[in-house]
Amino acid sequence: MENWFIKNKKADFHRIMQECGVSEVIARCLVNKGFTEAKEIHSFLNPQFDSLYDPYLMKDVDKAVDILTEKIETGKKIRIIGDYDVDGIVATYILYRTLKRLGAAVDYEIPDRIEDGYGMNSRMISDASNDKVDTLLTCDNGIVAMEQVQMAKELGMTVIVTDHHSLYETEDNKFILPPADAVVNPKQPDCAYPYEGLCGAVVTYKLMEALLDRYDLADKESYLEELLSYAAIATVCDVMDLVDENRIIVKHGLKLLGKTKNKGLLALMDACGIDRKQLNSFHLGFVIGPCLNASGRLDTAKKGLELLLAETKDEAVCLAQEVRELNNLRKDMTQENVNKATDLIENSPLKEDKVLVVYLQDCHESIAGIIAGRIRERYHRPTLVLTDANDGIKGSGRSIEAYNMIEELSRCRNLMLKLGGHPMAAGLSLIPENIEPLRKALNENTSLTYEMFVPKVTIDAQLPLGYVTEGLINELKQLEPFGKGNEKPLFAERNLKIKSAFVIGKNACGIRLRVINQYQREMDALYFGDLDAFFAHFAGKYGEEEVEKLKTGRGTKIELTATYYPRINEYNGFRNVQLMIQNYR
């Protein structure tokens, strides 16, 4: 079950169409996104590279640049400490590549997801001291590493922290910073930077942009554009809101990535079958990103970084194949465990729980969060997936809007060894004996109701097929890139008759329909999803006999009401407009 809503926001659409030169459909989409004035609409539709903010507005950037300039000039050893996800890999790459180019004595360390966990630890600090490292430079971590930074300072090291995560906040609402020589993080309350929703890689990009002001590079402008293209990957993959400065970065970054000369990225796009002319945010978030992430999940994140740093085509092709194969393995492992989790829920009392706590004993701990997200999508309930780890039980959770996961878990903190996260996701560890008590506590004390589990589908406009043209689809591209904070518009059409149907795709994962509306306009419509549920839904409405006709491509009485997004399909020189069905009734 789903609740469908049409937004129906009011505005002077005629004025917007005239002042901004857009169609009524685009005007409605813009109003639904909160834009009504011509100036802000123009800025949204035409994000300008020169509208990026001055990096020196960020607190401590000047301090960090002074320190790095002095360390480079005196040949002091600098060690970058990154993170094992895409944002951390890209942030490390931006720092390492730039510092190396400026002649710094620099190397890097990325923690192992399983052995080290998130962020720098005391072993890394000791290793750096033993290696005679003078300066530690963190990226995408460090803002809450109080003890580790203090340890480094006591060992005589200089420490620069660059991060984008929230600051440590005490119970009396005071913020505490690590005792570093410079802390670059736009979330600091006294930071003058106009936009704080940046990923870790963009924070490092800003720092390197400021540092390059001190150096006379002939190709400085083109080099900064190149760095920006990598920051665009991290922005999408770290699920930052694609608004404000992030929209500029990703909009321009995608154009630059289509022309990239990075051997590793070129090899990865080739390995994944990406047409660089059609590159969009989906490819970053669901193809390139997962491959880089897989290296950190199942092997070492250094492999993803080595891919970006590859200097020869042969090396790049080899590494690209490795990370792609790791991602394929990750996908297989994920699906296997999603199936196990679903069977466990369906065949146990868990099915009645409002907060799902699923223990998958043999699941690789690095994919617990992905599985929790899949189960959350299926049942639209807050989900925790727990699994055996080297030091007890570890787990990851994914939530729904109605449930503040970190707040609810914090009420059960006595049952856990470690806990961290935010309202929509969390990570935790506990002893085996506390799995069932945690499940009971979360479910007995929740204010969730079953009505909250009904997904809401928000539609931008009811749009008959006659309005869906190549011209409209090309105009909709002005709203890209799509992602968090700038979702793809959703349209709907009622009572579509089905002229024919064919099951398609690997493992019969989709169906292609030829649909006709009440005005006799025909169009192809594709749906990729749970086909068993699709057929069961219409069997309940029209009977098994009509569904059997549908499956075998015969005429049927079945009518479809669907939400969709249109696209142009090109195959063997033939172009046609298709509807990509998102929801159906």
Image: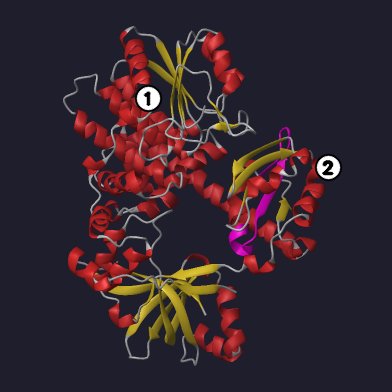
Residue 346 is situated, as x and y percent measured from the top left of the image, at: 73, 65
Residue lying farthest left? 218
Q: Which residues are magenta?
A: 376-396
Residue in front for this viewpoint, 371 or 310: 371
Query: Residues at badges 2 and 1 in contact (C-beta under 8 Å)?
Result: no
Residue in front for this viewpoint, 523 or 483: 483
Q: Callout 2, which amino acid?
A: Glu
Residue lying farthest front? 172
Task: Assess whether residue 391 is covered by the magenta stretch.
Answer: yes
Residue at point 78% right, 46% down?
435
Inspect this view and state whether residue 478 appears. Answer: yes
Mark 1 surroundings: few (<14), some (14-19) or many (≥20) residues within 10 A = many
Q: Is residue 470 left or right of residue 548?
A: left
Q: In the rendered view, tell whether residue 167 sits above or below residue 46.
A: above
Q: Callout 1, which amino acid?
A: Tyr
Label 1 secondary element = helix
| Residue denoted by label 2 | 433
Q: How far apart are the two marked residues, 2 and 1, measured between alpha carbons?
A: 44 Å
Residue in front for this viewpoint, 340 or 267: 340
Residue at point 38% right, 20% down?
64
